[in-house]
Structure formats: structure tokens, C-alpha cells
Amino acid sequence: MSSYLRVRGQRAALELLVVEVYRRSTNWQQEYYTVHQTIHLDQFDLELPLDAIYEGVF
């Protein structure tokens, strides 16, 4: 395994949507991504916009 994602969301007066990315290449340091950002997953050669993850949810 070279990386994994943890998706969290809270809905309150202000919406907080966060994806945590952990990568072996960075010694499993947390990287945080929020709405309107894009995650690049090297092992899949994939650009993943967070807007796409949450599309139609809120």
C-alpha cells in the first residue's frame, strides 16, 4: 500500500468537508484537502476533485 484516504464530513452552520491523505512517500504524514481542491493519486494516475466526491450530497 502506498497511500490511503480518510474522508470526514461534518454538517453544521458551516459545512466542513475534509479528506486526509496519507502517503508512504511522505512517511505517512497527513495531507488535508477541502472542497474545491484536487487530490492526485500517483498509483492510479488519477486526479480526484473533492467537488466530485461530494457532488449531490449537500
Image (spheres, rainbow, N blue to C red):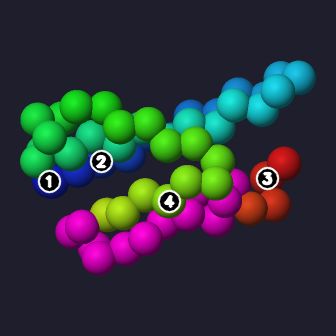
Q: Residue furthest top?
A: 13
Q: Earlier in the sequence, mark 1 or mark 3?
A: 1
Circles 2 and 3 in contact, beta carbons < 8 Å: no
Q: Would you call the spot at circle 1 few (<14 residues within 10 Å), some (14-19), or many (20 or more)?
A: few
Q: CA distance from mark 2 to mark 3?
A: 22 Å
Label 3 SS: loop
Circles 4 and 3 in contact, beta carbons < 8 Å: no
Label 2 SS: strand
Magenta residues (range): 42-54
**Location of mark 2 (residue):** 4
Q: CA distance from mark 1 to mark 2?
A: 8 Å
Residue 22 position by quadrant: top left
Label 1 SS: loop
**Location of mark 3 (residue):** 57
Q: Would you call the spot at circle 3 few (<14 residues within 10 Å), some (14-19), or many (20 or more)?
A: few
Total labels drawn: 4
Q: CA distance from mark 4 to mark 3?
A: 18 Å
Viewer-proximal residue, 57 or 50? 50
**Location of mark 4 (residue):** 38
